[in-house]
Amino acid sequence: MITPLKLVDVNKQFKDGDRQIEILKNLNLTVEKGEFVAVIGPSGSGKSTVLSIAGALQSSDSGQVLINGRDISGYSDKEKSLVRLKSIGYIFQAANLVPFLNVRDQLKLVTELAGEWNDDAKKRADDLLESVGLTSKAKKAVQHLSGGEKQRVAIARAFMNNPELILADEPTAALDASRSREIVGLIAQEVHDKNKAAVMVTHDESVLDFCDKVYEMHDGGLRLRK
Ligand code: ADP
Ligand code: MG
């Protein structure tokens, strides 16, 4: 079985003035198909950094980043952008939708970029909008949606290209408690019904029951919370 995500001895430092600060120290993480993993930890502990390295958005200083069994560490920017487009669905804290496009066109755009906007994709977009409860808003411009609705569009968009790996960085930060459970429930459903792998960074203890494992940032690495 191919492992969707494996981080091996990942290190990352940032410059703070003339000091180097080690944010990630020999960090290891494996996420198998069908697994929904949470990463928690204090602000500034490196959660977003781990996620963005796993999501091919920034590089590690050393270590391996294996997406579907392939080490992307040495990939060119172009190769990384293809991995992001085809294999990774990234959900940001603020939905990060494209202004002025309607709901359905947010989904169309990512699939057009992948060169796959065909009849199957159109049906998939409509099915996804139905599953997140937005069929009646498909033609609405996203700036007129509520925070919860925008986040549901972002989720549908992240699932659109059928990625093996879903990465969510504090997806519920802007939402109230019941909307938060709805959003995280949608991610859990995609993972468990379709055998995807997902990592969610969160501060929100009230959604951890959806996750199969909870890791805490600890001294630049991850440790399993019992
Ligand atoms: P978290 O998501 O857990 O709040 P981050 O991963 O965003 O933490 O950041 C971890 C630490 O690394 C913070 O101290 C942050 O200021 C620092 N950091 C993150 N990105 C950069 C960067 N591009 N340049 C310098 N420092 C950074
Ligand atoms: Mg963060």
Image (spheres, helix red, strand yellow):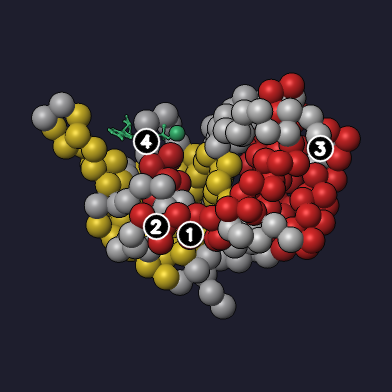
- Read off the residue under disc 3: 138
Q: Label 4 to label 2, Cα distance in Å?
A: 29 Å
Residue at x 81%, y 34% (from the top left corner) = 139
Query: Is any part of residue 128 visible from this angle?
Result: yes
- Label 1 vs 4, first from the N-terminus: 4
Q: Amino acid at mark 2?
A: Lys
Q: Does any atom of ligand 1 lie closer than 8 Å to the CB of label 4?
A: yes
Tell me how many marks there are. Answer: 4
Are the residues tagged 3 and 2 within 8 Å (C-beta)? no
Horizontal arrangement in the rendering, residue 150 relative to residue 49 (left or right): right
- Read off the residue under disc 1: 82
- Read off the residue under disc 4: 45
- Expressed as whole percent of the image width and height from the top left, the position of residue 95 reads 61, 33
Of labels 3 and 4, the one closer to you: 3
Residue farthest toward the right in the current orientation of the protein: 136
- Expressed as whole percent of the image width and height from the top left, the position of residue 212 reads 62, 54
